[in-house]
Amino acid sequence: MSGETMSIFSPRLAARFDALVKKYPVKRSALVPMLLYAQDEVGYLSDAVIAEVAERIGITELDVRNVATYYSMLRFKPAGRYNIQVCTNISCMLRGAYPLLERFQEELGIGHKGVTSDGVFSLEEVECIGACCWAPAIQVNYDFHDDLTPDHVPGILKTYRSKAEGAEGTAAHA
């Protein structure tokens, strides 16, 4: 992108993208990391995100979408502030992942790929988060929680709801 073009990304992320494309001999190699960083900042891969990423690395928006649709961790719709991923792969499944997932669904009132009405939580069933030795496990954004039972769910939700309320209170007083 030229220096004159406005970015939808923060200056910090735009600079990170510039450094990434210089790091790889082929700019396209930076695509997946760029999409992950963009999703972290924006919340999902909007049309504007896809357009700017495509422009930054010199490929078509269709090329970006084709790659992005391959990866289940990339989203095209907004998720909650805290995205809860419940692993239901074999190790977690055998150690109680489905009752755990059901408890999250009951407590939150949403299903797979759902978002609570207040936007604080989203929930999804995922194949593997790489915590098989400590099954069943979940990931909330980048935080792992393992060796869980359905009885752990209310406490986990309370912790993240408190964080969300604290952040809102801080933002309101800023």
Image: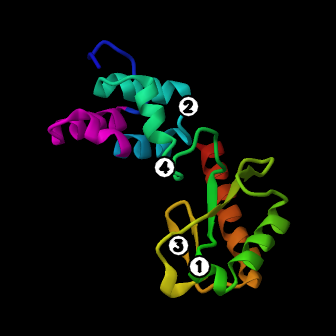
Which residue was labeled with disc 2?
46
User: Which residue sits at x=46%, y=26%?
Assistant: 62
The residue labelled by disc 4 is: 71
User: What residue range appears in magenta?
Assistant: 11-32
- Percent position of residue 74, x then y: 52, 46
Determine contact: label 1, label 4, CB under 8 Å: no
The mark nearer the N terminus, 3 or 1, is: 1
Question: Given the image, on which type of amino acid does mark 3 rest?
Answer: Phe
Dot 4, how many residues are within 10 Å of its Cα: few (below 14), some (14-19), or many (20+)? few
Mark 1–mark 4 Cα distance, whole angstroms, equals: 20 Å
Callout 1: helix, strand or loop? helix
Between tags 3 and 1, which lies in front?
1
Up-down relation of residue 146 to residue 24 (above or below)? below
- Residue at image x 34%, y 38%? 12
Spot occupied by residue 42 in the image (x, y as percentages of width and height): 52, 38
Instruction: List the residue tagged with mark 1.
Output: 90
Badge 3 element: strand
Quadrant for the N terminus, please: top left
Place residue 43 in its image quadrant: top right
Residue 144: mark: 3
Disc 3/disc 1 C-alpha distance (Å): 18 Å
Mark 4–mark 3 distance (CA, rounded to whole Å): 20 Å
